[in-house]
Structure formats: C-alpha cells, structure tokens
Image: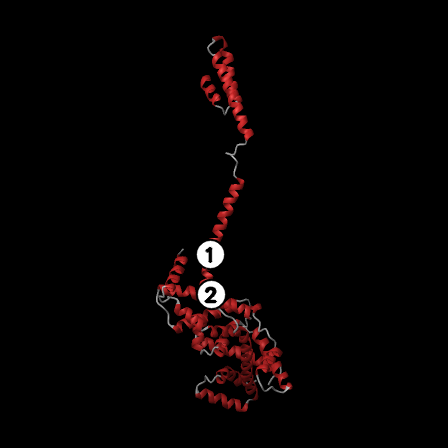
Amino acid sequence: MDQIIADLTIELNHTTGKLLPESSLMEVFSTEQWRLKRIIASMGLNASDGEDVLQDVSIRALKQSKADSLTALSSREDNIKWLIRVTVNRCLMEHRSRRTFRRNAGEILKRRLETKTASKPAIENVIVAEELEIVRESLQKLDDSLLAPMVLRYFCNLNSKEAGEILALSPSAVRIRLREARIILAKQLLERGVD
Amino acid sequence: MEKYCENIEQMLVDYADEQLSPSDSSKVAEHLARCEHCRRLLAGLQKSLELAGIIWADSLAETENIRIPTTKIRKIRWLRYAAIAASILLVTTVSVVWHTLTRPKLNELTFAEIERKITESGSAARLLAAAELLSDNPEAETIVKQQYQHIVETYPETAAAAKAKLRIK
C-alpha cells in the first residue's frame, strides 16, 4: 500500500509540474548510462544480459531515489558512485558461465578493419588476431575479484581510490588486485610466445 | 629470474601506470636497462592492456544499442497495478460464475413438483378433515390418532401435517 501511495504521489507531482524527488538519481542514471554500459560490456556480458542488468539497475535506482527522498538528497558524485557500484555488483552476480566475450579475435579484427580506412598487412592481422584471442581467453578466465578493478581502473578511468569506494576495498587493495590481474594477463601472453 | 626481478615485478604495473615515486621509477628504469626478462614483462603488460581495451571496446559496441528509457519504468509500475487490478477482477468474475453454476437449485421448482405439492396438500387436508369429523366419536379415538400419525409421516411438509402434530399432542 505504501508503494502504491508513493507511486501515486510521484505521478501527481509529475503531472502538477513539481520537482520529482527522485529526479536527481534518475537523471544521473539517464546521463550516465554510457558509463554503466562500459562496465557491463567490459565485464563480458552480452547485450541481452546487459539489458537485464541495466533494467535492474534502473529499478533499483528508482527505489533508492524514493528512499533518498525521505532523507537527504545525495550529490551527483555520490549518485554516480552508487550507480556504478550497483552495476558492478549486478554484473558480478551474473553466473560466471554466462560471462563471455562473444566475438572471437577474427571477428573483432574484421569489425575494426571495416571502420578503418587503412588496413594492416594480412600477416600482421594474423598476429594481432592470435594475441587478441589469448587475451580474450585470459579475460574470460580471470577471477571476478580481479576483473572488476581492472575494468573500473582501465576502462572507466577511475583511480584506485574511486574504484576502491565502489568495490568496498582500500586503494592499496585495489592496487594489489590490479597488479595481480595485469601480471596474469601479461604472463599468459608471454607464455604463448608473444613478445 | 633473479631475486631482484621479483621485487621489480611488484613495481612494474605501477611503473607502467606511472604511479611510482620518482626515486622508485628511476630504480625500475635502471633495472629495465639491464634485464631483458623484465623488459619483456613490461612489454607484455602494455600489450595485454592494449588488447584488453580492444576487446572491451568491441563488447561496448554491442552493448551501446541497449536503450533503457527512464520514463518506461513508471509505465511498468502502472502496468503492474493494472495487472493486479485485472487479476482481482478476473478472480472475482470466475468466482461469481462458478458459484452461479454450481450452487444448489433450492428455489427452482418445476411444474411437476408444484403439482405434486398441491396434490399432497389436498390429500393431507382431506385426511385431516375426515379425522376431525371422526374425532367427535369417542370410539374412533384410536383410529383418529393413527390417521393423524399417518398424515404427519406421509405428508410432513404440508399445513395439515402441522395441525395433525398439534392434535396428537
């Protein structure tokens, strides 16, 4: 019943033109979807699973904004962090077997070449394809606890402190995990004879 | 691999990310100048990150088509309430129809039933009238009582049966 009353109140406020209490978080969600998509993509979820994750995050954001409206409104930065944290956690919840960087190296290269005017020599493409395949496999095998810091640090351009706040880790713990993940990827590449 | 290389390895990622202090950075640079193993590892760190970036970017191209309009969420909520209301309506309708179809037909009398009841009432009334005429004769007391009893047992739903019960008492 409370839920219905809350929804009715929001709808009424909306129609009468009053400022929506949840507008800040939902607005942040709208404007920051690109960032959340980067996380989803780099965590290895496909478009279908990614859409589920994003839908869940949006619903959680709506609920959270109602909870916020009863207390104090959060800052934009806090809202962004909250959204990233929920998205990362939601991605981690997805079953590991569902994680798949779907396209193989050959397809990735083909897509990249289609978007570039100058193509590399065929032999060079073969080498890159092999290297991409190794890293793709390594990313798939990488533990979630190592993948998440890598994604936030290197694909979302967050520093260790920001990534740590999202993952509930200290900045030093983030650095340790980053080192471990990077060394694993590098060594697997070198072990397969790539210099 | 030298023992010293193991220590450097711990710093290589930070070195590649330019997160080391100037003094530590110099130490690593000096070591790299004379250690091919660590130079290869550094190259591997850089290359693997570059390739990971390509893979992530490729996955992103697929994910970018996802559209989650925020206004849709409110519609989903209203749809949910509409669905709940529709469910309640459906259950109520089904319940009413079910009760209508399955309730006992207590008040529905057929013409045959009405005719039977009239016949019984008439018969009972005639028997009662006859019994009351006989009741004036003291010798017929036993027969009258049997008659009343017969009316009560054979036509229990009639008005005559009710009167016969009173007479018996």
Mark 1 falls on what kind of element?
helix
x and y percentages locating residue A137 in the rendered image? 59, 75
Q: Is residue B136 above or below residue B15?
A: above
Decide which of A102, B36 is in the foreground and name it. A102
x and y percentages locating residue A186 in the rendered image? 56, 81
| Disc assigned to residue B82 | 1
Q: Can you see residue B118?
A: yes
Q: Is residue A143 above or below residue B31?
A: above
Task: Residue type at mark 1: give it.
Answer: Ala
Mark 2 falls on what kind of element?
helix
Decide which of B157, B6 is in the foreground and name it. B157
Among the 4 quarters of the image, the one containing residue A131: bottom right
* Mark 1 crowd level (few <14, some 14–19, many ≥20, 10 Å Cα): few
In the rendered structure, which disc, 2 or 1, sits on the residue that comes first in sequence?
2
Task: Residue type at mark 2: give it.
Answer: Lys
Decide which of B117, A24 is in the foreground and name it. B117
